[in-house]
Structure formats: C-alpha cells, structure tokens
Image (tube, grey):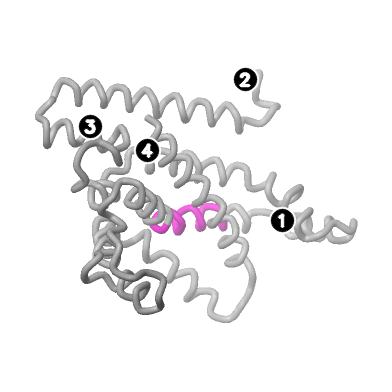
Amino acid sequence: LAHTLVWVVAVVVITLVLSAGLAQFLNKDFPGRTAVRLAILVPWAASVVMTTTIFDYMLDPDVGIANRFLVDIGVLDRGFGFTKEPGPAFLVAIGVAVFVSVPFTTYTILAGLQSIPADIDEAGRVDGASSWQRYLYLTLPQLRPAMAVATVINIINSFNSLPILQVLTGSIAGFSADTTTTLTFKLIRQNQQIATAAAMSVLNFVLILVIIAIYVKLIRPAGEEAR
C-alpha cells in the first residue's frame, strides 16, 4: 500500500506540474510549434511495453547506452544496475510513467488554455498583475475542469499500471518493489494464489473508488455542494 501511494502520488503530481508548464509553452506562438506538438505525442502513441523496454535496455549495466555514457563522462566508475535493485528500479519506473503520461496531460491542459478568453489575461495585465499572478489567480482557476479530468485519468492509469512496473521490476525477487496491482499479478502468475489475488483485485477496486471520490469531492466548486 505504501508503494502504491508513493507511485500514484509521484506520477500524478510530477506529470501535472511538467504538463502545465509544457502546455503553457505550447500555447505560445513560435516557429515550428506544430512540429513540436506532434513530437510530444510520440511517447503517448507508442506502445508502453516498447517504450519501457527501451529504457530498460538503455539502463542495462553491461550494454546500456545510458550507463555507458555515465561511465564515459566519469559520473560512474562502472555500469550500475538501475533496474536490478528495488529502490532505483522503482524510481526509474516513476520516470517512465511520467514520460508516457505527459503528452495526454499536456494536450488536455492545452485544450483548457485555448478555451480561456484572451481578454481575461489582458484585464489582469491592465490592472498591473505580474505574469505569475495572472497565471495563479486568473488562468489556473479557469483550468480547473481540464486539470480535474487529467488528474482523475492519471490516477486511474497509474494505479492500474502493470506494464511499466512488470518490465522494470518484475524480475526482482520478492515483493519489495510491488504495488497492489503488480502484487495481484504475481500472486496469480508466480504463486498460483488465485483466491488471494481475487481478494486483492476487490481491494484495488475499492481503493480506486475511494481515491477518485475524495478527489472529486475536493475539486467540486462550492456552488455545487448542495446538488
């Protein structure tokens, strides 16, 4: 449960922060904007298993290009098994999950940004508000619906994510790098504990309902409380 909490919170929060900044950048008019927008879609359009496998090979202690680069520039004395130990493998998995989640979240927030009337920002500028104040007090409240959709979908996706963790941590012995989802998978595939796995799946279902219910309650506008 602790691993699951860290996994979901880290992936969702980092994804939202990076995507909000990236969406703000892509909302600007600059040369090559269309090409950059298309390039950002690639991690989302590609197979999650394929993307994760590429990262796994890049970080291989013997033949990985990332490990070789770190050795060549003197950061490491020799290749390090980033995906061979529970802690580092879990951090790598969070990074990969963020990498594949950013495109969808960015486009969701970008759609929200483009629906905001330009005169709202202009009114803030006329009143002397700084760019940070305009974003915090004018733009961000308008992005609430888009951020809510992106957050809920990312919570569901990361909570139920199996491919990333299975590729990067599935070979690690024991359950030291497992979430409740990967634990259920291992109980079926490795231990043949069907009854326990079934109970875990019910627990997962209840957990995701509780998480989303709490989040929806928190982001509901005050005027809707009585409905």
- How far apart in space, not on screen, are marks 2 and 1 (Cα)? 28 Å
Q: Nearer the viewer, mark 3 or mark 2?
A: 3
**Disc 3 from disc 4: Cα separation:** 13 Å
Residue beneath the point at 25% across and 64% down = 60
Q: Which residue is mark 1?
A: 117
Looking at the rendered image, the disc whose residue lies closer to the viewer, 1 or 3, is 3
2 or 1: tag closer to the N-terminus:
1
- Few, some or many residues within 10 Å of mark 3 (<14, 14–19, 20+): many
> Where, quadrant-wise, is the N terminus in this rendering?
top left
Check if residue 101 falls in the magenta segment: yes
- Viewer-proximal residue, 118 or 32? 32
Residue that mark 3 sits on: 184
Residue in the picture at 26% in, 48% down: 169
Identify which residue is drawn at 38% across, 35% down.
4
Range of magenta residues: 99-110
Looking at the picture, how far across and down is residue 10, in whole percent?
47, 45
Mark 2 residue element: loop
Position of the C terminus by quadrant: top right
Label 4 crowd bin: few (<14), some (14–19), many (20+), radius 10 Å: many
Q: Earlier in the sequence, mark 4 or mark 2?
A: 4
Q: Given the image, on which type of amino acid does mark 1 rest?
A: Pro
Task: Identify which residue, 20 or 96, lies in the foreground.
Answer: 96
Specify whether 18 is left or right of 63. right
